[in-house]
Amino acid sequence: MLTNLILILVVLSNLKLLASSRLGAAIRVVAAQGVVLGLLPILAHREPLAAHALLLAAGTITLKGVVFPWLLLRAIREAHVAREVEPFVGYSASLGAGVLILGISFWMCTRLPMPASIASSWLAPVALFSIFVGLFLIAARKRAISQVLGFLVLENGVYTFGVGVTSRTPLIVEIGVLLDVFVAVFIMGITIFHIQREFDHTAAAPAGDGKD
Amino acid sequence: MTLLLAALALLLGGGIIVLATSRPHRDWSWLAAGVVVVAAIVGGIPAVQVLAGGTVSTLHWPWAVPFGQFALGLDPLSAWFLLPTLLLSALAAIYGAGYGKSGAEPRSLGPVWFFYCLLVLSMVLVVLARNAILFLFAWELMAVASYFLVTVEHERPEVRQAGWIYLAATQVGTAFLLALFLLLARQTGSMDFTVWAARGIPAGGWAAVLFVLAAIGLGTKAGFMPLHGWLPEAHPAAPSHVSALMSGVMIKTGIYGFLRVLTFLRTPPLWWGWTFIGIGMTSGVLGVLWALAQHDLKRLLAYHSIENIGIIALGMGVGMIGWSTGSAPLMVLGFGGALLHVLNHSLFKGLLFLAAGAVLQQTGEHDLDRLGGLLRRMPWTGTAFLIGAAAICGLPPLNGFISEFLIFLGALRGVALAPGAVAVSLLAVVAGLGLIGGLAVACFTKAFGVVFLGTPRSESARTAAEVGPAMIGPMLILAAACILVGLLAPLAVATLPRVLTNLTGLPTAAIHGGLAGAVGPLLAVVTASVVLLVILGLLMLWRRRLLSRQVVATGTTWGCGYAQPTPRMQYTASSFAQPLLSWTSAVLGGRRQLTAPNGYFPAAASLHTQTPDPLHPDLYRPALDRIGAGLARQRWLQPAAVQLCILYIALALLALLIWKFG
């Protein structure tokens, strides 16, 4: 029951992200999502609490709920950006796309063969929804910070799936942790280099050269 | 099999150690060469055992790669290719250690030896692999290792260009190979060579497709004529001991692969044999003609590799015709000649490249027309080159003769027995082999005469000296092997039956019956040659005795009694080849710039000839350019913005999920 509540919160936070133009609010939403997801390994398993589940929960909450938001908030403060400007896809259109993605995710998961031990039947669709929302955010937004947030949401999707579906210390969760570390480095890079506007300017080469 | 694994481990470990510990001023060449020699001896023991009648050994290890299995096997066919690979690798390694650094730039030899070890390792793995994935892995390892060896002197732009051409050619070959293996796997439901050989592919549409894929994919490595473009570029660019290894054995892995595929495809239809005779004729005749037109010694040798691959293809063609017409003698003699020529070519082509490398090291001259008179300055190298040259021309009693003789004999037998069109095609083989042999003699007369005879044409040739014993030793061993295999021809033929049984599945009696016809004439030729050699030796002794009491004066070769002869009065490589080339200019094309001598006291005259290979990789350039331009027009698809890249990925993912689960 609690698992389902967490999953609903994740869906709602994703939709909020799609509709939000204020970066500070978006960072806090992602942080909240991270904290809620951190509780998932404790709730998802019916077995008695294992030390590794607690450890995983503690690590996730610290990283996603404290470290990342702090880094990101500092980054927008230093770069003097508060809002996303001129996104490729508008906010109401993004919200519409989000609902569509949610539908597709649920529909697709009815076709997906699932292991019997899965904690909740909503787990897979929500995970898939998070992944697609993350990808959508990266594709539709211009600010580097928004793209980092998109990446975090994508990672949250992978994490949700890994924790919920596999029962004991699974490889996939470790991969998720690795991705976390990567994101941390990513964020550090942004803070250090003070990217002011669009991700484009430094990450992608000018057209014509370096395309391959 | 344990010994083979030990050899593989030695090569890998030795290569890594040499790479890790090498510094520019510290030379580990002898350690690396030692490792290769020990590995060759350790690996050679099981190969000899299998050829001598030992049991066929296999090994199966699970491997984490999908569909892959670390499956090795050593049957007589593998052993036949393994033996020259190991022999030439060891000899070329010793030579390479004596050769030291090549090129002007000071560089650490660690990476060179690392890739050398890796190349030997991958060639061993290619002939042992019994799983398609493992085979492809070894095949690619071989391509990459040899690419880095070709581009050792990467500071020279033409070497980088040659490296690119080689890499592109080998990748195209692998693409066809991949298609071949995937189709075979689809037909049989397995990636295992033993399963493929046991099930076989029934004759018909699929077999034809597989044959064409194999001929292109493996023929690119072997250097069949329209696909040979990389050979004359890569061989001169590589260090000489690497050229010897690549030309001597690496291109033979293409032949090995094709013979292996033939054991899966079983009975070939008649047109496969004709295709191979066509490939063999083109590669053989055109290869030797272009060799004749070359001015660079190593490039000339590279074209001769194409010619010899042509001879091997002719043998295989004869064998396949025998297979499809059910004629055991044709099959045995054709395939037997081809197999024996694989061994022989590795011996004499290895020798010739090593000798060419010695000349290059001592003179620094690539151009034939700047050499000359080296026989007196480098007697060992010169003699070794002469023996190799006689062997490659197929002159008795050397080894090149016996393998060509087997193919000749097979074709002649077929002409007598087979009906109509088959007989005509075999007659073409006889004529083609004769033409190739004759032209090869002309070409090596030119090469040997211009490089080693006469007087030096340049200062660097005048001051050349003999190379060190580490380089002479391997050349002499190879020269001795050429003579031995030739003189012990009946014995060499006697090792063939096990390999042929392995390849064709014929009963032993039929194979012995096929080969029996060849042993008699071979014995006669060998005896006659030995008698003639003895007579020649006696005559030389007699001459020396007669001259010992006389005053002997030495003069310049081709002095012609002029008061002031200069080296420029000698025949050059161009002028020697000119009659033959003008006679074949309709085929070869080529450009000449002639300033004819004019008046009673002509002051200046000059002749420049240039015969570019029309099948040079540039042949493919218009087509490639068009493809490139077409693809450039699709560039708008490839976004500069990160967002679009991600969008593509997301859409692809979504489409895949919907397609799979929808």
Image (cartoon, rainbow, N blue to C red):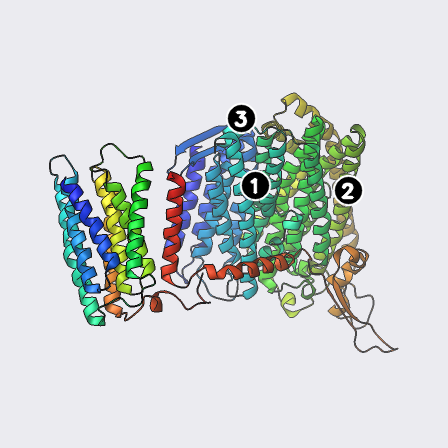
Mark 1–mark 3 distance (CA, rounded to whole Å): 28 Å
User: Does residue B289 appear left or right of residue B79 in this picture?
Assistant: right
Looking at the picture, which amino acid does disc 3 mark? Ala
Quarter holding the N terminus of chain B is top left
In the image, residue B225 sits, relative to residue B491, either above or below, namely below
- The residue carrying mark 1 is B84
User: Does residue B158 appear left or right of residue B15 in this picture?
Assistant: right
Sequence order check: which comes first, mark 3 or mark 2?
3
1 or 3: mark nearer the eye: 3
User: Does residue A92 appear left or right of residue B511 in this picture?
Assistant: left
Where residue B591 sits: x, y (%)?
Answer: 74, 64
Sequence order check: which comes first, mark 2 or mark 1?
1
Where residue A133 sits: x, y (%)?
Answer: 29, 53
Quarter holding the C terminus of chain B is top left
Which mark, residue B535?
Answer: 2
What residue is at 60 percent from the left and 59 percent from the top? B626
Q: Chain of mark 1?
A: B
- The residue carrying mark 3 is B198
**Does mark 1 fall on the same chain as mark 2?**
yes
What residue is at 35 percent from the left and 69 percent from the top? A201
Mark 2–mark 1 distance (CA, rounded to whole Å): 33 Å
Residue B471 visible, this angle: no
Q: Chain of mark 3?
A: B
Looking at the picture, which amino acid does disc 2 mark? Ile
Mark 3–mark 2 distance (CA, rounded to whole Å): 54 Å
Looking at the picture, which amino acid does disc 1 mark? Pro
Q: In the structure shown, which secondary structural element does the residue marked by tag 3 occupy? A: helix
